[in-house]
Every structure is written in C-alpha cells, then in structure tokens.
Image: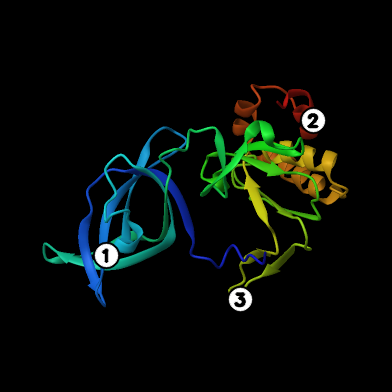
Amino acid sequence: MDTVYSENNHIIMVGKVTSDKRFSHEIYGEKFYIFDLSVPRLSGNSDIIPITISERLMVNGELPIGTKITVEGQFRSYNSYGEGKNKLVLTVFAKNVTLLEDQENEFLYSEGKYITKIKEIDLPKDYIKIRSRTIWYLTGYLRTSGVKDLYYTYIKENHLFKDDYLYISYDKKIEGIKGKYGNDEVRNFDFFICGRDIIKVLFAIEKNSDIDTTEIRNKIKEKFEWWKENEQEDYKRSFGGKKIDDIFEYYEKNIK
C-alpha cells in the first residue's frame, strides 16, 4: 500500500442523517442532493456537516433521517449568492456511503465497511483493541505481529498524544519526505494511529513482532519531555499532579 497522507483531500466521517435530502444540481442526467449529517465530537457536542451526494449512492434514492452512516469523500467549496452578498459554502462531496444500521451486531467489519463472519472471540491473540480518531472514534482491532517498520511524528502542543501519529507497515520501509510545498509527508504505511492508545499498541508490537523500536521510543520520550517542560498545566492535569519520570514505566504499570 503506497499512501501519501498529507496530499489527499480525503475525509471519512461517521454520523447520523438529520435532514431530508434537498435537490442541488444535475450533471448529464445524474441528480445530486444535499443532506445534513450530525457528527459527534469527543465533548459530546455534534457538528452539522452538509453532504453532497449522487442519487446513485442512496438506497432506493433515500437516506432516512436517523440513519447512521459512514461517508467517505472530499471537501468542496463554492460561492452561494443570496441576500445581496456572496457566501462561501463548505460541503463534503460523498464518494462512498456505508450504512451502519447493524453496527451493534456480534460480527466485525473489515475496514469499518465490510461485514465479516468473524467475532471478537475469533481473533488471534496478536490482535489488540484500539480506539482512535484515525478509525472515526470507533472500536477496532489491529494486528501487532508481522510489523516490518514503524514511524513516529509529533506536534509540540498542549496535548501529549492527541495529534501524534504512529505509522505501521507490514511489508515496506516507511518514508518520511518533504512534499513539493515543503510540508512533511509519510509514505508506504498500512495503518496509522493517534491518541492515547499509541503506547499500548507499541507495547503489543514489541511483544509480537521482531522489530527494533528504539527510535520510536526515543521520539516519544522527546515529545513527553518537551510537553512536561512547556505545558505544565496540561501535564499536571493529565496525571493528577503525579511526578512522572518515565512515561513507558508509567504506562506499563497503569495500562489496561
């Protein structure tokens, strides 16, 4: 899998339909509609995102209010003229829609889209349960054996792992390069995870894969020391005022 993350205008969202479809436009006989999707935040609040969709992607031409779906697509913008002025409208142009009506059943989904005949109990022991923004804040299961390469990036901000990423490859060397606009890009990874489960996943990979993680550990330590020194309020709040000298030792004792 050859993935260039930063160059892709690619979005995946999970939410509930909150409005009836509204006609938008027609191109070569294909009708397009707009509907509203309520997408929850971690805070419990929700954002209402307008979705533009082709009639081809709707079951029987409909998406009933309350339906839970996954939307894959791209951000698009256009100017809407009304009340004597232009208004920039941002919408998500849907390229694929997956219904999640039976998400709560006992069978797992591959890539969050394709139902399988596999249950959690059937998974080998090298699979670990995760929850991350990179899988739309759903619960998933990641294979931690057979990992060939790891790559870690972090941002200096007032969160320890929220916007830090662990990239995983099962067959190729991961590349970190500069894009044509000078931005950082990561290539040749199969999966990536951000958030609090990063160290838990790293521990499992160390247990189940023959791979040297020294460089990854050093980068995590580097971020942790910067964060502890520069974001002291967030550091104290995150650990209840406890003094943490070794982030890995802390997680080994407290991780579940």
Q: Residue type at mark 3: give it.
A: Lys
Q: Is residue 154 left or right of residue 6?
A: right
Task: Measure the alpha-carbon separation of dots 1 and 3.
Answer: 34 Å
- Mark 2 residue element: loop
Residue plotted at (54% across, 32% down): 106
> Which of the colour schemes (rainbow, by chain, secondary structure, one colour) is used?
rainbow
Which of discs 1 and 2 lies nearer the camera? The answer is: 1
Quarter of the image for residue 200 reads: top right
Residue 82 higher or lower than 142, as above or below: below
Residue 224, position as x, y percentages in the image? 72, 40
Left or right relative to 215: residue 8: left
Q: Label 1's element?
A: strand
Name which residue type carries label 1. Phe
User: Which residue is under mark 2?
Assistant: 245
Does any portion of residue 131 appear in the rendered image?
Answer: no
Q: Which disc number belongs to residue 32?
A: 1
The residue beneath circle 3 is 180
Q: Is residue 84 above or below residue 121?
A: below
How crowded pointer 2 is (Cα within 10 Å; few <14, some 14-19, many 20+) is rated as few
Q: Nearer the viewer, residue 57 or 138?
A: 57
Q: Is residue 53 left or right of residue 178?
A: left
The earlier-in-sequence mark between 1 and 2 is 1
Q: Tag 3: Cα neighbours inside 10 Å, few (<14), some, or many (≥20)? A: few
Q: Which amino acid does the dot numbered 2 rest on?
A: Asp
- For discs 2 and 3, the disc positioned in front in the rendered view: 3
State the residue in front, 215 or 53.
53
Q: Residue 245, can we see it? A: yes
